[in-house]
Every structure is written in C-alpha cells, then in structure tokens.
Image (cartoon, rainbow, N blue to C red):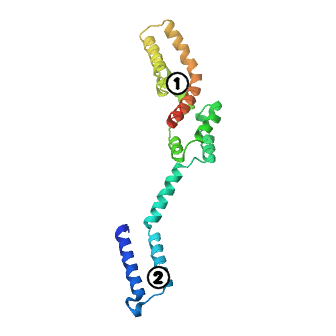
Amino acid sequence: MKLNKGIFKSTVSLILAVSLSIGMGGSKGFAISDEEKADIIKQAEQYLKDNGLRFSKEDSIAKKNAKNNEDDLVDPDEVDKFLEENQKYFPDKEIFSLRKELLKLTRKEFLRVKSLNFKSPLGMFFVSFFLGEFGVDRFLLEDVPVGILKLGSFITLCLGGFGLFTFVMSIFHIVDWFLVKGNTREYNLKMVLEDMGRH
C-alpha cells in the first residue's frame, strides 16, 4: 500500500509532538525520559525508511549523490569491457584513440554511447552481396552519392545500356564487397564520435 508522504510525515510529527509534550510534564503519569524520546524518534525514522519514505534532508542528499554519480567520469573498466564486447564494430587501428575519447565522458554520456545501434560489418557484407547493385549498402552507410551511382548503373544495365560507365560500376560492385566491412567500421566510429560531439 502506498502512503501519501506529506500526510504520513504530518501524522508522525503530530505523534512525536504529543509524545514529547507529555514527556515534558503535560501529565505526570505519562512522563518519558530523554532516552525514551530519542528512542521514539529513532523508531519513527526507522518506520519511514522501512516503508520507502525518507526525511526531506535525506531525500535531497540522495538526489545530490545520484546527480554526482551521473557527472562522475566513466570507470575505465567499463570502457574496456565495452570495447572488448564491441571491438568488431570499429577499425582495429582506432581502438586505442577511441578508448582515450571514451574515458573523457561522464557516466551519463557513456550510457548514451552504449545505447547506440552499431551496424554489423558481416551483416553489411551480405547486404552488399545481395542488394549492392541497388546501392542499398551505401544508402545504409549514409553514402548517398555512391549509392545513387550504383543504382544508376543497375538501371542503365536493365534498360539495355552497356557502356564504359556500366562496366566500371559492375567492377566496383565486386570491389565494394571487400570494402564494405571496413566502411561499416568507419561508419560506427564516426557515429560514436558525432554522438560525443568531438567529430
């Protein structure tokens, strides 16, 4: 059962005030010692904590600590684990410099980088192999001009044209099968750097 925090605090405060006033001589038969007063306050605090409620001072401290954790720099172990799990998505020669850049991020910024959807180099190879003549692989990597050229050469070939342009682009389709994995890794790196605002 969820309690209204404000009403509950007011009720506890009222009970404490009545208990303390009785203890200060309001009624001789109900007098309590300082030790008992401290015990009542301690029990009330414990009850509030057990029910998921905290005094406003503790709330503000908890919020401040949470904000400080977000503003802390990312743990190097987290960065190393991330790079180990995602190394296949980035160029090998850029891993060290990428690590240096990631270590400059706060926890919040690093979580944003971790949430990015990286394109699989192997998956892009298959896209290039089966749909490369339509330029789909290049469109997915946001290389629109080359995608249009590949699509244009396919349309030209379908319309019966076979000139130098079509011949060159047919060769390029095959060469692109070997380039697409590297291009995908470069695309993923660029995406991370742009997200960090350092590209």
Q: Quadrant of residue 52?
A: bottom left
What residue is shown with label 1? 128
Neighbor class of circle 2 (other Cα within 10 Å; few <14, some 14-19, many 20+) is some
Up/down of 193 relative to 75, above or below: above
Give the spatial CA distance, label 2 vs label 1: 77 Å
Residue 130 coordinates in the image, percent (x, y) = 51, 24
Q: Which mark is residue 87?
A: none
Which residue extends farthest bottom?
A: 29
Dot 2 falls on a residue whose secondary structure is helix
- Residue at 46% from the left image edge and 77% from the top image edge: 41
Q: Nearer the viewer, residue 132 or 49?
A: 49
Neighbor class of circle 1 (other Cα within 10 Å; few <14, some 14-19, many 20+) is many
Q: Nearer the viewer, mark 2 or mark 1?
A: 2
Which residue extends farthest front?
A: 24
Dot 1 falls on a residue whose secondary structure is helix
- Residue at 60% from the left image edge and 47% from the top image edge: 78
- Seen in the image, is 101 located left or right of residue 151? right
| First in sequence: mark 2 vs mark 1 | 2
- From where the camera sits, is residue 4 visible? no
Q: Nearer the viewer, residue 196 or 16?
A: 16
Residue 135 coordinates in the image, percent (x, y) = 47, 21
Residue 6 coordinates in the image, percent (x, y) = 35, 68
- Residue at 50% from the left image edge and 35% from the top image edge: 197
Kind of residue at disc 1: Ser
Kind of residue at disc 2: Lys
- Residue at 52% from the left image edge and 37% from the top image edge: 196
Up/down of 61 relative to 180, above or below: below
Residue 198 coordinates in the image, percent (x, y) = 53, 34
Quarter of the image for the N terminus: give it.
bottom left
- From where the camera sits, is residue 11 visible? yes
Q: Nearer the viewer, residue 169 or 68?
A: 68
Q: Which mark is residue 37?
A: 2
